[in-house]
Image (cartoon, grey):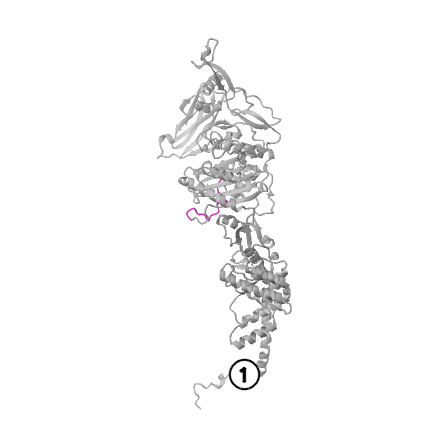
Amino acid sequence: MTRTAEEPVPALRARRPAGWRRRLAIAALLAPVAGVAALAVLAMTRSDLEAPAPTLLVLDRAGRFLGELPAAGDERLGFWPLDRVPARVAAAAVAIEDRRFALHPGVDPLAVARALRQNLASGRRVSGASTIAMQVARLQRPGERSYLRKAVEAATALAMTLRHGREGVLRHYLRIVPYGHRIHGIAYAARRYLDKPVEDLSWAEVAYLSAIPQSPARMDPYDPRGRARTIERGRTILARLAERGELTPVELAAALDEIETLALPWRAARPVEALHPLLGLAARVGEARRLEAPRLITTLDLDLQREAERLAERALADSGGRGSANAAVMIVERAGWRVAAALGSAGYFDLERAGAIDYLRVPRSSGSTLKPFLYALALDRGALEPQRVLDDLGPGPGGVVNSDGRFLGPLLPRAALANSRNVPAVALLAEVGLDPFYAALGALGLHRYGGPAARYGLGLALGSLPVTLEELVGAYTALAGDGVPRAPVWLQGEVARAGERFVSTDTARLVTHFLADPQARLPTFPRLGATEYPIPVAVKTGTSSRYRDAWTVAWSERWLVGAWVGHPDQRPLTGSTGYRVAARLVAELFGRLERGRLDGLEAAPFPAPRGYRAERLCAVTGRRAGVACDRVTLEWVRADEPLAECTAHRRLAVDRRTGAPATAATPATALEARVYVDLPARYAGWLARQGGAPLDAALARAKRDAEAHADSATAIDVISPEPGVRLMFDPEAPRERNTLALRALVEPPVGQLVWYVDGRPFATVEAPYTARWPLAPGEHWIEARAPFVAARSQAVRVVVD
């Protein structure tokens, strides 16, 4: 028999198992049950009440709008939780969104039946049956609308109501429902639109806000047509509330009148001047604070913030020829250590100045701004006393020199710090110890121990440690706050956290007096300049290597102010120093802050250190000033500290015709009184550079002492070069630049000194025993010898590459 192509071979026919019809019937009966079970499981997995973290609404100290900080990665705003739903808000939401809210379990069967009837009759969707619980389900998982999706939302609504109760669902709905302009939740909408707590809303305001969620885009309260639609729907809500007995006729009439004239406050724009502190707050405020108090009232003063930017821009414009690019400012109110202004840059959207960078928090070379902490530490540990003389005689360890290239000779700590001298600071750091100073700076929050102290070396006193302006101002609270650092606060109601005491109260006050003395800043900083004020203000400037950064920190009785000026790519500022740029900016800021007090009548002096007495000291010797001392300063010394009178200065009568001491034969018309100074031998070079009478006296003393001690032991110490120093010979530099300074300390002084290089005499010199040796490549040994006496220095090894 022949088969067609379509007829199957018997062996290949599918055989149906026995009882297949019964199994198919059972499957058909169980399918709806399985579907319902799956839907129930899906609904339960979606029944959690979900919302992003609340938006932080940030205001200044006067309640003015600064900005909003939504949850990370989410542009939507609001989502403020409600601990308790206000009765008016609950009544309005139920009246307009779910009239039988209290009677159904999350799905309203009557509303579903009505919607089906109307939709079938019209052949299209004209009515919905969404309850508040179903809207919560849709808001948490939005998507295209369909009957299947509606069924899932209904099942989820039932599960939510079962798990969280009607009140929990309503509370969550009022947290996440949209109100336009990315705003979600009635609590946040009340703050942003009406600037009041949701608990204080009137009936008209509740109705107005409750009208918006139906169609936030069409009900835009800032658009005239949207406002009209909102008012119309609000009137409908008020009418329904009256029908339900929530409003009396009198309340209804008042609410209808109010809603017609309801005025929203001006829609505040985010002030660009406060963008950096606004963004900085996001990192300061944790999730717990978002949930507890998402409305943040900061300590910032918006007017002062704007003034700081205006003055910073003016300072940059005035210094534009010097290459200044941007600036940062931090102003702290000492009462409570509250941050009143924090400017991250001058011009956030200025691309040329890279204004989007928050320079308040960018580490930069600190310049001389850390010197006050070094002096404070030395004073506190007894390594330094206010009357001790520090030497500024020549290059210090490693060839350190002062920024102005000058050496001011013997200086008291007040003058050495006020003049910001590098040489005494480096010598003091070597005495205090690198590790103790580095640890002290770490305790002040200026570094986080990212490396050993040796990484920075003695340059730690001169700016080798990068710091941020925010860190620096925080550290200066220790000096301004009687020795105890405090973390400046950014939010109203917070208390400044006190850190571990840095130095004693007396030490902090001493350093404050040092830095508040305009006379002590001479000759480096002129009187009546940017660092002098008509009221007591302590000031410290700083300039980093090659003029890359200009700093100033200053404090008065009421304010602590810090400023930084620099270029984002660390280009030099072409001669701009902390004094020339940053100090002027700070002075202008103080003019704004202390307005009305600059006549000095209300300003009290800084408090004196306790247990100290004021004493007139000789500025050269640190002893009690005598009648012949020509440089005198008023200094605080310990009350129980005995002080000898200065004998280094002597007033002698001379014959002005010859310069020799006067005799009985000298006529009265030729008599002249001159002051001579008699200092240790190490000051001979400095005295020689001063010229005049001190030089004559010093040389006379040197010759006299040489004769008196010709047979006594002479000690010679080479102080330049340092042992083991390695130098680079520059063949392109002028010959006079390729030299090495030779300096020695001789006690007691001798008439002459001979410098030897590689065992051969190089130069014979008299006091102050200095010479310059032309560099030659290779390894060399240098020593100094005193002729005619058996005295020589240690040989110093020098390598020239």
**Is residue 725 something that shows in the picture?**
yes
Q: Look at 64% across and 69% down and name the residue there.
A: 103
Tag 1's secondary structure? loop
Number of numbered discs on residues = 1
Q: Look at 40% across and 23% down and name the residue there.
A: 763
Task: Please tell me whether residue 476 is drawn above or below residue 613 in the rendered image.
Answer: below
Q: What's the magenta region?
A: 351-366
Percent of width and height locating residue 1: 44, 91
- Please name whichever residue, 297 or 402, is drawn nearer the observer in this view of the structure: 297
The residue labelled by disc 1 is: 16
Task: Please tell me whether residue 209 is drawn above or below residue 152 in the rendered image.
Answer: above
Percent of width and height locating residue 75: 51, 57
| Magenta segment includes 778 | no
Percent of width and height locating residue 34: 59, 74
Q: Main secondary structure of the magenta part?
A: loop
Q: Quadrant of residue 403?
A: top left
**Is residue 45 something that shows in the picture?**
no
Instruction: Count residues near mark 1 (Cα–Cα under 10 Å), then give few for <14, some for 14-19, many for 20+.
Output: few
| Magenta segment includes 357 | yes
Task: Please tell me whether residue 189 is drawn above or below residue 749 in the rendered image.
Answer: below
